[in-house]
Image (tube, coloured by chain):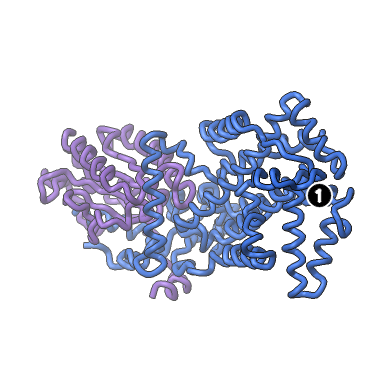
Chain colours: A blue, B purple
Amino acid sequence: MASPSLDRYDPDQAPTSRDKGFDKVLDGIHRGVVAIDRGINRVIPEEFNPFYYLGGMTNVLWILLVPTGIFLWFYYKPTTADAFSSVNYLTAVVPFGGIIRGLHRYAGDGMILLAILHMLRNFFTDRYRGFRDVPWVSGVVLLLLTGIVGMTGYLLVWDQRALIVTTAIIQALQSLDGIVGGLGSFLAKALLAGNEPNNLTLARMFFLHVGPAVLIFFFLWVHYLRLHRPKIWPPMFVTLLTIGAVVLAAGILPVEKTLAAGVPLSAAGSENIVYDIFYLLPVLALPSLGGAGVLALLVLIFGILFIVPWLPRKKHRYVNVAFVTPENCTGCQLCAIDCPFDAIVMVEGANPNPRNKELAVVNDDKCAECGICVGACPFHAINLPLANEDMIKDKVVALLS
Amino acid sequence: MTQATEISTENKHIAQNGKPKIIGFVCEWSLGRNDIIHEDGTVKGYEHIKTIKIPCSGFVKTEWVTVAFENNAQGVFVLGCPLGDCHFNEGNFIINERLSQHVTRLTNRKTIDDAGRVAELYLGVTANSEFTQSLEDFSRYIESLPPLAAPVKKAKGAAKPAPKPAAPASAAGGDA
């Protein structure tokens, strides 16, 4: 005989209820994602499953990109005349220059690939809405910044491909003229530092490569803000796997040779240009969609991504937020330490018992309603309203009688 | 909780299907919404195993494990998401730590005779076959052990009144 109060915490009210409409589709994909994990867990111990550390792996590659980028910057000359030859010099002459350029290339590719996988996985396992709205939105900003950094990175080489990509960006920007008169031309002029690519252009591109990259650090901080102990760094096995894969790619596939921007696009040249689909997909789509089409598509995709946490809104939020019984709280901090979402703050001087210094206070917006604090508290001071510890204890006794 | 404090008679630890009683705490994000567990908490095909659905495996108070053993349970298991994939990031690692400490405590106090009476399972939402397999193994292991000496329940046991929910306004509104 189950206690009637616990029956309020029934499966239909539980946050996992997904049996109709869009939620049912999501649930099916969730099961598929977990089935892949299950396959990997048969081979690799589950603590080291790379799929559990997609965000951490993205961060490993990001940390790998910074020193390799600084190395490249030592040799790079951001002028139209010298850029291409300096890149060639560091690739061919500088010791390990080619391999480090390869690392920078493939770490960048891997970063956006893993970031997208990380996003999809968190979407399909329902870890993007409710109390996770801040990580999601900052993650979309990070994706946008990564895309900008990656695309401008291809311009810095200043080869034929860079010229094509620049032309494409200018074309896309100029299509904005139709919406706000002169806006597109102004942006294009600001980007090129003139009407034509000139010596100042690459300095601006260089800033657009490094500036957003610095912003990534800021938004990573926002990304981790709601987590008490974010999994910033994966286990050693996963870290070495990630770095090893990039080193292997850089060793097997050296960065392709291109022709300088000054060389005219002959019939032989234009088909042989290699495009990186991870970053240059919008440029590839330009001929078929047109500048305005590509821009509209990007705005649409990122606009949807930004509001996704509120599209199928989490219905059961604030239903089961933990509450503290101040008379029982001793201010021992155990719940605050164990809370994975930093939702409990210890307030000094608020405890009704003057012998106890601090009182645990729950931040409703950060609370994930998981009850980890309930398991932490030895003093019966913190509880979930829909699954009170006495209800569970009664249920244990009832099930065993 | 309102049960009379008494020394249990010999068959209290045996369920109706003749097997030792086992109780499980099941995380609703791992297998909790699976049809393998009946509405009333019994596992399909294992009528002696009763489960309680919880929001996260980290929610389990180690005190409840003690309460279960004091009420003639012969085995207790906690089911969580795979380690590293907790829906709430850390719940399964946290319960892993807490249980390993608590089991040592229980064996030292002679509440249980064998540390294997407490099991931890970490399974994803689709791992039905692994779940039944683990339960089969666990159940067999418990059967191979001698019945747990019925503890003399102290009158105090679970007597401290836990606070009643102070009827938060949000709970009343969102539950309907």
Give me the chain letter of mark 1.
Answer: A
Q: Position of residue A356 (x, y in %)?
A: 56, 52
* Residue A388: quarter of image: bottom left
Element under label 1?
A: helix
Residue at the limit of the structure toward the top, as seen here: A95
Pointer 1 local density, CA inside 10 Å: few below 14, some 14–19, many at least 20: some
* Residue A108: quarter of image: top right
Q: Is residue A236 left or right of residue B85?
A: right
* Residue occupying the point 46% across, 48% down: A376
- Quadrant where the image shows the C terminus of chain A: bottom left
Question: Residue A354, can we see it?
Answer: no
Q: Is residue A107 left or right of residue A28?
A: right
Residue closer to the observer: B16 or A269: A269
Residue closer to the observer: A202 or A196: A196
Question: Residue A35, can we see it?
Answer: yes
Q: Is residue A381 left or right of residue A355?
A: left
Residue closer to the observer: A234 or A266: A266
Question: Exactly how many numbered labels are in the figure?
Answer: 1
- Quadrant where the image shows the N terminus of chain A: bottom left
Task: Identify the amino acid type marked 1.
Answer: Phe
Q: Position of residue A125 (x, y in %)?
A: 44, 55
Q: Position of residue A240 (x, y in %)?
A: 56, 31
* Residue occupying the point 60% across, 49% down: A277
* Residue occupying the point 70% across, 36% down: A257
* Residue occupying the point 62% across, 62% down: A288
Q: Is residue A191 left or right of residue A102?
A: right
Q: Is residue A339 above or below residue B164?
A: above
Q: Is residue B94 above or below residue A142?
A: above
Residue at the limit of the structure toward the front, as seen here: A267
Residue closer to the observer: B37 or A72: A72
Q: Kindly identify which residue carries mark 1.
A: A207
